[in-house]
Amino acid sequence: MEGRPTDGELFTRAQRGNQAAYEEVVQRYQQMAFRTAYVITGSAADAEDAAQEGFVKAYRALATFRSGAEPRPWLLRIVANEAHNRVRSAGRRHQLELRVAERFRPGDAAPSPEAAAVAAEDSKRLLGFVNELSDEDRLVITSRYLLELNGEETAAALGIPEGTVKSRLSRALARLRVRVEEGAGA
Amino acid sequence: MPEATQLEQRLAFLRDEIDWPVTPALAVRVLARIAAPTTSAIVRRPWFQSRWALAAAAVLVVFAALVVYTPTRVAIADWINVHTIFTRVNQLPTPSPQPSGPLGKRLGLGNPTTLAQAQTKLSWHILVPASLGQPDEVYLQFPPDGPPQGEVTLVYKSRPGLKTSGQTGVAVLITEANGKVDAQMFGKMLGNGTTMEVVTVNGHQGYWISGQPHVFFFIDANGNFRDETLRLATNTLLIDDNGTVIRIEGDLTKAQALEIASSLS
């Protein structure tokens, strides 16, 4: 029985004009693309447009995708570029307000109501500090930790060299830590 | 730095707590746009320059699609000018639930009108099938939601001998549109269980699409795919009547569809 094709195999098929393979690519990556665009634009509607436009442009640029390369950063760069363009053309970025979901996750170790409330409050406070960061700091922290992008992918999403990601992340974490400590002492 | 590590751990924990907006289903829209020539990088020649080349290509590709179900764009058949983008897919996308409300809104047909009023606003003679008589409802649609020269839809809720379609809730829908040769107004995605064959009605050529329901959507005046109109469609006959494309949709047999089409006047 044929196993699930790898991302690279799907890209190779899509490069040969197989639209079903590209449909699978879109389905695999749409969440990552949409959320990345959402973090950049701060707007779900703009993120949807950017992700859709990015996937269309990526399809048309498939011939430029180097066989053997990592598809995720390649796609992310195109989608993120669309998202950044939307922010630029609008002249401003929507205020991104990430929120903590109000839900009980299956598989949680059945915390006591008090413990759950404390954990939820802790998450909300930390996310509040992240939301208050500058765009540059918030983007790098969100990309790396909340979107779980690796260094190369974060670089693609932010449109910066990979080497810059580490230093920018380090500075952003330091500033976040200050806020957290000040918040704890308040 | 221990503090940074602890902070990173808390951020990692936060990852699963975020209330992200729902990720939209993009695959259908992306595929529709890839297939749409108006947004494609492909430069297409005027139809008269390549009429026979296109005819040959269309026949070959349609034949190939019927024999082997390789996912591919089937044809933009200018020689049979049905103003429709066809896409072959291995797996049909699942359409979103249709909006609630009256038929026109639910199926994206436009605004209700009468046959007489619609005729005053359209540049071509609206064809009505004598076999079905006067329609029960008529809808008209213009840009931005419809094609540049408009489109009219005749609704036949029920007729003796005809089933009510599970996809539309009525017996027969007839949509007519007219436009430039290269204008695309409709899109169709056909899965493996749907067949498509070339037919001739009163000397006019067209397609009979039957079998498993296929995906149908309207394309607006700018060539954009209107995702709110994406729905499953049942058997459909598409014919070109001197530049007017007519689509007849219903839970019909081929013979019933051809009879309706041949009674258009």
Image: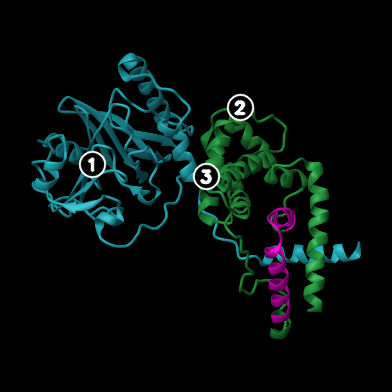
Residue reaching furthest right? B1
Q: Are marks 2 and 1 on the same chain?
A: no
The magenta region covers A117-145
Percent x, y for residue B113? 15, 52
Which residue is located at x 36 percent, y 23 percent?
B58
Percent x, y for residue A116? 70, 80
Q: Are marks 3 and 2 on the same chain?
A: yes
Q: Nearer the viewer, residue A73 or A13?
A: A73
Q: Colour of chain A?
A: green
Let me know if residue B38 is in the magenta part. no
Q: Quadrant of residue B244?
A: top left
Percent x, y for residue B161? 15, 50
Q: Which chain is cyan?
A: B
Which residue is located at x 15 percent, y 40 percent?
B260
Q: Which residue is under mark 2?
A: A63
Mark with earlier residue (3, 2):
3
Marks 3 and 2: CB-CB under 8 Å?
no
Mark 3 belongs to chain: A
* Side of A42 relative to B156 (left or right): right
- Secondary structure of residue under mark 1: strand
- Secondary structure of residue under mark 2: helix
Mark 1 belongs to chain: B
Q: Nearer the viewer, residue B76 or A169?
A: A169
* CA distance separating discs 3 and 1: 28 Å
Residue B151: image tag: 1
Q: Nearer the viewer, residue A80 or B63?
A: A80
Please state which amino acid type lies under the numbered disc 2: Ala
Q: Estimate how packed mark 3 is, as few (under 14), some (14 to 19) or many (20 or more) residues with alpha carbons within 10 Å.
A: many
Percent x, y for residue B50? 35, 15
Please state which amino acid type lies under the numbered disc 1: Glu
Residue A52: image tag: 3
Please state which amino acid type lies under the numbered disc 3: Gln
